[in-house]
Image (cartoon, helix red, strand yellow):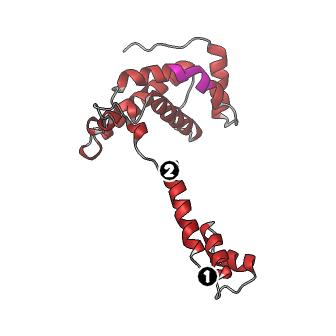
Amino acid sequence: MRIEVPDSIEPITLWIRQLEESEPNAAQPLWNHFCQRLMDMAERRLSRQLRRTYDQEDAALSAFHGLCRVVSERQSDLQSRVNLWRLLITITERKSSNRVRDEHREKRDVRRTVTESCFIDTRRDHGIDQLEGREPSPEFATEFADLCESLVQLLDDETLKAIALLTLQSLDTDAVASKLGLSRRTV
């Protein structure tokens, strides 16, 4: 396999030395220089289906993190930018291959991942955006508020009404007691 070596020798060598010396901002220029190449390489290794859960940026970030760990633990001697690029290629390919293998295990097979298309009602052209969320609809919220108000009005005692209203505002027993000047037990 032919290794493509990136351009601009001098800054890369400087950045490698800074990374080896654990300088705080040393990784950023290396990442900026190599990230697009790493993502392009990872994209070729990852299927479109797999990229829904783990894309080329994830692979590049993981590989670069691995490189920084290797360098900080002094597990590799990066004498030149060629060694750095070879190491990055190796890490990226292995991370991508491992992820492909992991994602095709029976329990998490990405080929069995459900897509949004299963939520589309072909008769009405509604997708996942049309499913109800955690928030109530405005109609339901209005109806619920009216019901709560009518139930509170059924209470004979003004103190009970005040307790009910404060409880509907999500105040706990201690806060209601404090606000009304009552004991916790009374509330």
Which circle, 1 or 2, is nearer the viewer? 1
Which residues are drawn in magenta? Answer: 30-36
Judging depth in this view, the residue of 32 and 152 nearest the camera is 152
* Location of residue 93 (image quadrant): top left
Q: Position of residue 144 (x, y in %)?
A: 51, 60
Instruction: Please say if the residues under marks 1 and 2 sit with CB atoms less than 8 Å apart.
Output: no
Q: Amino acid at mark 1?
A: Asp
Q: Position of residue 22 (x, y in %)?
A: 66, 37
Q: Quadrant of the N terminus?
A: top left
Q: Amino acid at mark 2?
A: Glu
Look at the image and say whether residue 100 sits in the magenta stretch. Answer: no
Q: Residue, x 64% and y 76% (percent of image)?
A: 161
* Location of residue 106 (image quadrant): top left
Q: Residue, x 54% and y 71% (percent of image)?
A: 151
* Lower sequence index among marks 1 and 2: 2
Q: Quadrant of the C terminus?
A: bottom right
Judging depth in this view, the residue of 101 and 131 nearest the camera is 131
Residue 136 visible in the shown view: no
In the picture of the structure, the residue carrying the numbered disc 2 is 139
* Residue 42 numbered mark, or none: none
In the picture of the structure, the residue carrying the numbered disc 1 is 156
Judging depth in this view, the residue of 128 and 154 nearest the camera is 154
Eyeballing the image, is 174 above or below 132? below
Give the Cα distance between marks 1 and 2. Answer: 29 Å
Judging depth in this view, the residue of 147 and 56 nearest the camera is 147
